[in-house]
Amino acid sequence: MSQNDPSSQPSDFIREIIDEHIRSNRFGGRVATRFPPEPNGYPHIGHAKSVCLNFGIAAQYGGTCNLRMDDTDPSGETLEYVESIIDNVKWLGFDWGDRLYYASDYYDQLYEFALELIRRGKAYVCDLNADRIREYRGTLTEPGRESPYRDRSIEENLDLFRRMRTGEFADGTRVLRAKIDMASPNITLRDPVMYRIKKAFHYRTGDRWCIYPMYDFAHCLSDSLENITHSICTLEFENNRPLYDWFLDTLELESHPRQIEFARLNLSYTVLSKRRLIELVEGHYVRGWDDPRMPTLAGLRRRGYTPEAIRNFCERIGVAKNDSLIDITLLEHCVREDLNDRAPRVLAVLQPLRVVIVNYPEDLVEEFDCPYHPQRPEMGSRKVPFSRVLYIERDDFLENPPKKFFRLAPGREVRLRYGYFLKCLDVIKDPETAEVVEVHCSYDPETRSGFAPDGRKVDATIHWVSAEHALHAEVRLYDRLFQVANPLEGKADFIEHLNPKSLEILKSCRVEASLATAAPGSWFQFERMGYFCVDKDSSPGNPVFNRTATLRDSWAKIAEKGKK
RNA sequence: UGGGGCGUCGUCAAGCGGUAAGACACAAGAUUUUGGUUCUUGCAUACGGAGGUUCGAAUCCUCCCGCCCCAGCCA
């Protein structure tokens, strides 16, 4: 069993805290977590870290994990975002059963809790406007001042708050505040706002409400209502924990979850903040939320990343409190690892160079049986047609090859994958541009299975496709979205760091005929080129492929060194 | 200059007083009909710095330095 493998049961400071709670029977041995996104953007790989953590812990401890939309601010929250969250968390492989909740479903209860706080003399209606409240709040080094409305009677507060709810007052004219401590060194505790007036349409409650609860008030109570035991959130909420506890303590609620904060994910060569992702989408720097260059789950999914790869990535990066910038090569490694195992191998020529085999019969067509996976024969094979005219990759031929290049070149012999040895006899160039347009070769009929009876060796094996039989295809090559590891570093606008070559569209690719029926979303390894998946833009006869990741390429490294 | 948090290899990250795991990256080599995969090997005399406690400190204490978060009627 996997219990013997410690690495299969992740351990981190959060799980240590939970272990301790179980030992001390703090929550009756129960573990209940929740993933609480605000539906105001598409979920990204950073959310995946939280999803994996919360659902992972629940599964590991035999507990539950709820999915809760933290929708307490009508502006920006939409059903489209809710759907994208549901869709993507499900795709990642997690199941919340029937426990899909919405903070907006708690509005009535939250309102009652607010009334109770007023009755306990712990909340008051404040008539200061936003600017005034800021002034009264003080600064990091100076204490704040108490609002002149702080000592209203309970009756007046109750009356005013009810009238706030009925829409008697204009937006921004009054708020409900918690009465805590205007001199607290923790600014979060300086009489924080609990409710604001916003006469805005909410995507779920419509115009039933014109006052909306703030995060600090709503979140702890939502957790409590759901009987959460461990409320896991990111580091920036650490300052808010005393407030989280204050509401629950002041209301004397039985269910008092423990808030635990961990460091959010940062990934090199991309950005993971909703605000900036929205900017990329709305500024049309990418083709939408599911653009394969985006770090959104929708983007990664369309790019060809598998849920398994993403989950594995989330496990490998660990959980701690250090601000970190994870190297994107780790994410890439995780997809390659998964796809190497499961992607069928297939032949595809991205930048075709025409090859005529001068000694191959004009009308002969042979079929080679090509296995789908070198290490997994159970994946089977398919027949690939071979004929006199082929296409090979442009990069696999060089008229004047450098020392370490051992692919095709004048006078050189290579092996065609699954086929014959091929020798270059002649190079045909465009008289105007001197560009190589065609290569004439001969093949050795004795080498049909890829070996020479005389035992002679060949340095390279290249991929190919029969000109007459191949399918035309569009292939989209993606590279990192940004040119620098940390686009947010420095004073420059992160947009300036966008990689102008993050997308290269190749329209004259040729892929083997077996791909004609490939379903959108299916993964392949184009041999020697990388992992690709069928894009949703494909139509019958016009397949479109996205490059998920290149293969590791030691030749590219050698070539790169040669340039320097 | 208030409060909260964090500082271990290029990047993450174990370590919880007994003499620095692992992963990615990188480098070298072996195998190979993908310059892929796989395999082997190398990669922190050192844990932000300085003192101190101790037979022994990345782990305990003190001071210092650096980075992140908080002054939304966002979450």
Image (tube, rainbow, N blue to C red):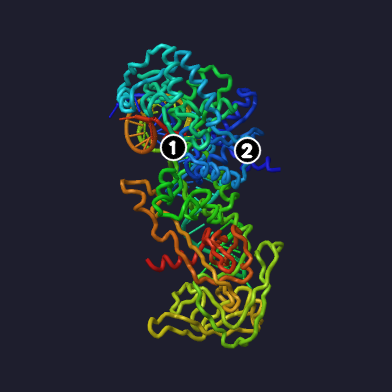
In terms of image quadrants, where is residue B47?
Answer: top left
Determine the residue positioned at 35% across, 21% down: A127
How many numbered marks are there? 2
The answer to whether dots 1 and 2 both sit on one chain is yes
Q: Which residue is mark 2?
A: A96
In the image, taking residue B3 as reference, residue A58 lies left or right, namely: right
Q: Position of residue A465 (x, y in %)?
A: 58, 75
Residue A44 in view in this figure = yes
Q: Position of residue A376 (x, y in %)?
A: 68, 61
Amino acid type of disc 1? Ser
Image quarter hosting the C terminus of chain A: bottom left
Q: Which residue is mark 1?
A: A75
> Which residue is at the front of the view, A36 or B48?
A36
Q: Position of residue A55 (x, y in %)?
A: 60, 38
Determine the residue positioned at 45% across, 64% down: A504
Determine the residue positioned at 60% across, 36% down: A100
Letter of the chain that mark 2 sits on in the rendering: A
Q: Residues within 10 Å of mark 2 (few under 14, many from 20)?
A: some
Image quarter hosting the N terminus of chain A: top right
Determine the residue positioned at 43% across, 47% down: A277
Label 1 element class:
loop
Label 2 element class:
loop
User: Can you tell which of label 1 and label 2 is closer to the viewer?
Assistant: 1
Q: Is residue A339 above or below residue A96?
A: below
Amino acid type of disc 2? Trp
C-alpha separation, residue under disc 1 versus residue under disc 2: 26 Å
